[in-house]
Image: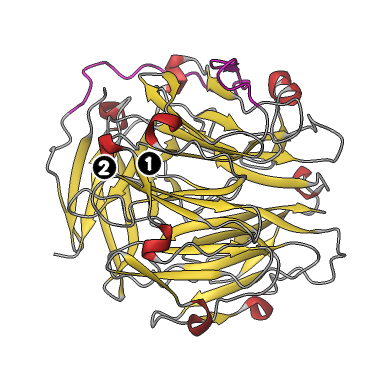
Amino acid sequence: MHRFCALSAYSIQIVLVAALVACSDEEVPTIPEGPLPPTFSAVQPDLFGATGAQPNAWADYDGDGDLDLFVGFRGLEDRLYRNDRGTFVDVAADLGLADPEETRAAAWGDYDLDGDPDLFIGRAGPDTRNRLYRNDREAGFTDVAAEVGVDRGGVTRQPAFVDYDGDGDLDLSVAFRDGPNALFRNDGGTFVDVAAQSGVADPRRAVGTSWFDMDGDGDLDLFVANQNGDEDAVFYNRGDGTFEDVTAALAMGRPGRPEDEGSVGTAVADYDNDGDLDLFVASYGPDALWQNQGDGTFTDVAPGTPLAESHHSVSAAWGDFDNDGWVDLFVNTRAAGEPEAKDFLFRNTGSGFEDVTPLAIVTRGSSHGVQWADYDLDGDLDLALANNEPGTSHPLYQNTLPAMRGGWSLQVGVTNPRGIWNRAGTTITLTRESDGYVTSRLLDAGGGYASQGIQPVHFGLPPAPGPVSLSIVWYEAGARRSSTVSGIDPGAFRGQWVVLQLGVG
């Protein structure tokens, strides 16, 4: 089991509890320069060989310090893969999660603030009810959806646990393809759907959502990706419990698409390393890359790049697979009658994107779920995929980046002062004075395919000397909050997570 190195922050002041004591006495190795080819190897292929997988999401459900993986299925019981120091065991049946009904969406979130991740499950049709499994530790998981008010049925897609109102607990938004979207406000552990009164009960055929601060005021705004020719939507958070539809003003609706085109999955990251967050939208039809202009507006810069081609994309995830400091993009596709339709791993070169998809992934890829995570704690990102086409699998690929490069990264988690992971949507910006390097990440607020995990953000770092600083922006008690900690030596945290405890004191 690895141990955590923790820092604490109260209001806008950072207190260095661990005093940045090295978690490892190893000397930081010399890092090879230049691009490295992506190299991945399949992990326990027999275990991950079942077909019908759809959403997938990482979280440390058992609190042992490594990431476990939930996978939802159609045609099979759901699975929860416990990570035992890099070896996985399916424990879903033992813990009450081996449900045979079709699962289309999954989100981890500590809704009751008791320190362990709970699991929301979204169903495929109007005749089945969604579920919320409370994590009862050794006793397993208990479905409390009806008890707490989130058992609404429907063709469910992207769920997300976020604190949209800044009151310190996790609310739950759910996208639906067959009716208005829901926004369940958490009132002391029970939920009330306030979507209509808040202005986000969008009736269009929604699939993906992204919650992040789009206008720079600190609170979480909402982008909704809609299918079947429906326009996308952007709702700015007014900070008073209501939202304003600013889609037309931002020109982000993508109007005029035919019925067989539309937006599906979303992915947020700072792909251009300018310190703000950009948005990729996987689509039936041309994909979109909305570059943040830093003034509350966005420009689609995909046209003219490989990202703009019509891949019939389902979902996507950003991850710096080669730790060169530029976040790369995995895009998966689905084509009827093609069980292994080509997926794409686009390397971000800093000046564009190039297709570097390894042959193993081309021939054994995904149609739905895609998630990056460092499950083996070696500093580089591994890749979990999910394919629901007949005769396919849901492979987990270990990133075999050379150790010299793999160890040069920093992984950062954010919690409240009690160590509870309730800061989904927090923006974390890393800067390094020695070379002016800057980039931002978003603490997972939903993505991949209709999934949300609980895990640290990952920063790959280009070779350069000197410490880094972390600036964190979150929304709490009706206000934008920010904190900065400087003087962090990434080499001191190799194989560890830097956990920042943030709260109003």
Whether the magenta-drawn stretch holds residue 458 is answered as no
Identify the secondary structure beneath mark 1. loop
Residue type at numbered disc 2: Val
Q: Main secondary structure of the magenta part?
A: loop
Q: Position of residue 68 (x, y in %)?
A: 41, 32
**Residue 46 counted in the magenta span:** yes
- Between residue 275 and residue 385, name the one nearer to us: 385
The quarter holding residue 144 reads: bottom left
Reading the image, the residue beneath label 1 is: 456
Q: Is residue 343 above or below residue 301?
A: above
What residue is shown at x 37% (from left), y 64% (from top)? 148
Residue 67 vs residue 251, the one in the foreground: 67
* Residue assigned mark 2: 499
- Tell me the magenta residue range: 22-50
Label 1 crowd bin: few (<14), some (14–19), many (20+), radius 10 Å:
many
Q: Quadrant of the N terminus?
A: top left
- Measuring 36% from the left and 16% from the top, which residue is drawn there? 29
Q: x, y (%) of residue 213?
A: 46, 65
Identify which residue, 386 or 309, lies in the foreground.
386
Q: Is residue 493 left or right of residue 210?
A: left
Q: Quadrant of residue 351?
A: top right
Establish if 243 lies above or below 37: below
**Of residues 62 and 254, the one drawn nearer to the viewer in this rendering:** 62
